[in-house]
Image (cartoon, grey):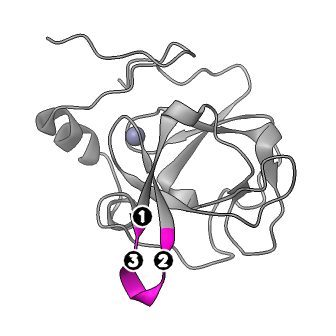
Amino acid sequence: MATQPLSPSGYKLGPLSAAERDRLAGRLSAEERRVLLDHGTEPPFCGGLLDNKQAGVYGCRLCGLPLFRSTAKFESGTGWPSFFEPFHPDHVRNIQDVSYGMVRTEIRCRRCDSHLGHVFPDGPPPSGQRYCLNSVAMEFFPAGSEPPRDGG
Ligand SMILES: [Zn+2]
């Protein structure tokens, strides 16, 4: 098996094989599949992680790669969980999205390429970025419960 690149934080960044991705996708609910795999968006003010104030790490629902820290979460008023910076810049991939007649920047998991949400340049200082996430695209790991580093 080929050695995967590690992020500076020590996490494998993939890419996952098609078989591995299919195996992990088999654990998802219909709504999780719709968002992560089919680039869907959950309705605002419905996500289970919107009001979560616990300390911890938000990981990718599909592969568990850490995406955001609770310390970067802020109340944006949009109805979706919002963060001003990622866990590490290498853990998310930005892709220009021109669907629905808008120019937006889509964010995807660096390891498994799942759709997570979008990033907008109207966030709070110091980053000025607003990472707008779907709750169902993430899994919350309370402080002390580390996400698996190899995506198991
Ligand atoms: Zn992932």
Mark 1 beta carbon near ligand 1 (under 8 Å): no
Residue holding disc 1: 96
Q: Is residue 13 left or right of residue 10?
A: left
Q: Secondary structure at mark 2?
A: loop
Quickly name the residue at label 3: 98
Is mark 3 in CB contact (under 8 Å) with mark 1? yes
**Residue 38 relative to residue 110: left or right:** left
- Report if the CB atoms under discs 2 and 1 are less than 8 Å apart: yes
Q: Disc 2 marks which amino acid?
A: Val
Residue displayed at 67% across by 56% down: 49
Query: Is label 2 in contact with label 3 (beta carbons under 8 Å)?
Result: yes
Query: x, y (%) of residue 109?
Result: 43, 44
Q: For residue 99, what is the image quadrant?
A: bottom left
Sequence-wise, the earlier of marks 2 and 1 is 1
Q: Which residue is mark 2?
A: 103
Using residue 120 as the reference point, say whether residue 108 is left or right of it: left
Q: Nearer the viewer, residue 54 or 82?
A: 82
Q: Residues within 10 Å of mark 1 (few under 14, many from 20)?
A: few
Residue 115 position, x and y percent, is 40, 57
The disc labelled 1 sits on which kind of residue? Answer: Gln
Q: Quadrant of the C terminus?
A: top left
What type is the residue that disc 3 sits on? Val
